[in-house]
Amino acid sequence: MFNLMSPELIWFVAGLVMILAEFVLPGIIFVFIGLGAWVTSLTVGLGLVESIGAQFAVFGISSAILVAGLRSMFKTWLMGRSVTDGQDDASEEFLGKPARAIGAIASGQEGKVEFKGAHWNAMAENEIAAGEGVMITGRDGLKLIVRRR
């Protein structure tokens, strides 16, 4: 008769749950932790490991080796490579485009600008009056860097 509480079955199911969790929480980590659980299931099933402490050691070591050794290779393979000349595609959408200052912005200070109908936080390179047209010269995260046109 098959024992539903056997350690190898518990490790196998835990690994399956972690591998399936990769679809919900992508990052290419859970799949390798799940594979570590499957390695543990295999070693327990073959009788190589018996104690719970040894099982957790096999799980921890195999998961760490799999994550450290294979994650970067699989991440590149699954997500592809992006080679740019120092600027990402999102920056190109903003650079050199006109916007309008919502309020006055002092040089080197933060304010708000309107770009494509949305309000953005902005850092001014020079003094800008309210309603004045500006040019987007850069981006720092979600903050636009602007100067007077």
Image (cartoon, helix red, strand yellow):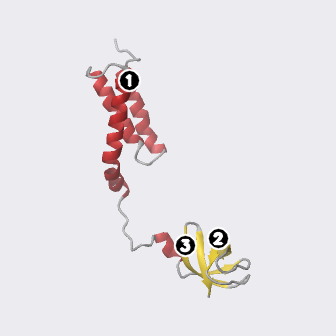
Q: Amino acid at mark 2?
A: Trp
Whole-percent x and y of residue 75? 36, 53
Judging depth in this view, the residue of 147 and 16 nearest the camera is: 147
Q: Quadrant of the N terminus?
A: top left
C-alpha gap between disc 1 and disc 2: 54 Å
Judging depth in this view, the residue of 8 and 58 nearest the camera is: 58
Dot 1 or dot 2: first in sequence order is 1
Whole-percent x and y of residue 115? 63, 75
C-alpha gap between disc 1 and disc 3: 51 Å
Q: Which residue lies under the disc numbered 1?
A: 53
Q: Secondary structure at mark 2?
A: strand
Mark nearest the camera among 1 and 2 is 1
Q: Amino acid at mark 1?
A: Gly
| CB contact under 8 Å: marks 1 and 3 | no
Q: Quadrant of the C terminus?
A: bottom right
Mark nearest the camera among 3 and 2 is 3
Residue 37, can we see it?
Answer: no
Q: Secondary structure at mark 3?
A: strand
Q: Secondary structure at mark 1?
A: helix
| CB contact under 8 Å: marks 1 and 2 | no
Q: Amino acid at mark 3?
A: Arg
Q: Which residue lies under the disc numbered 3?
A: 139
Q: Quadrant of residue 79?
A: bottom left
Find the residue positioned furthest to the bottom. Answer: 149
